[in-house]
Image (cartoon, rainbow, N blue to C red):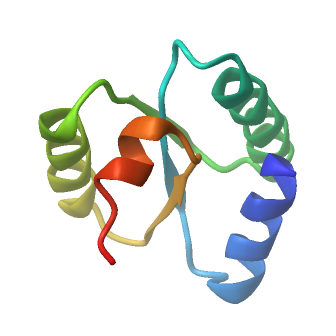
Amino acid sequence: MGGRWLELLKEIVPSVTQVAVILQRENPTNAGTFHQISVVAASMGLPLISAGVRDTSDIELALETFARKSNGGLIVIANPIATSNSCR
């Protein structure tokens, strides 16, 4: 499924030149999904930035850092940290 997310992102925004992935590294499901995304990113020649998060400050730092770059896309893999800090 993760690889498909990247394919859809690139289809919707063809100008994307790099992608950040927000994930909880300790979560086995997140690790598997990130691996799927990594495989597809490599086949597309698309740089991938892994942003492991443990709390709200990690999410904020990852987004602030990545937002400084142009033509970026973002994938957030569902996990308790991201879900509890999402905008509603």
Q: Position of residue 22 (x, y in %)?
A: 45, 43
Q: In this view, does 24 lie above or below 21?
A: above
* Residue sitting at x 54%, y 63%: 17
Q: Position of residue 79 (x, y in %)?
A: 53, 39
* Residue sitting at x 48%, y 27%: 24
* Residue sitting at x 69%, y 33%: 34
Whether residue 59 sits left or right of residue 88 in the image: it is left
Residue 88 found in image quarter: bottom left
* Residue sitting at x 87%, y 51%: 1
Residue 4 found in image quarter: bottom right
Q: In this view, does 46 lie above or below 61?
A: below
**What is the residue that sits farthest to the top in this orientation?**
26
Whether residue 34 sits left or right of residue 40 in the image: it is left
Residue 64 found in image quarter: bottom left
Whether residue 14 sits left or right of residue 77 in the image: it is right
Q: Looking at this view, is 76 or 48 the one in front?
A: 76
Q: Is residue 87 above or below residue 25?
A: below
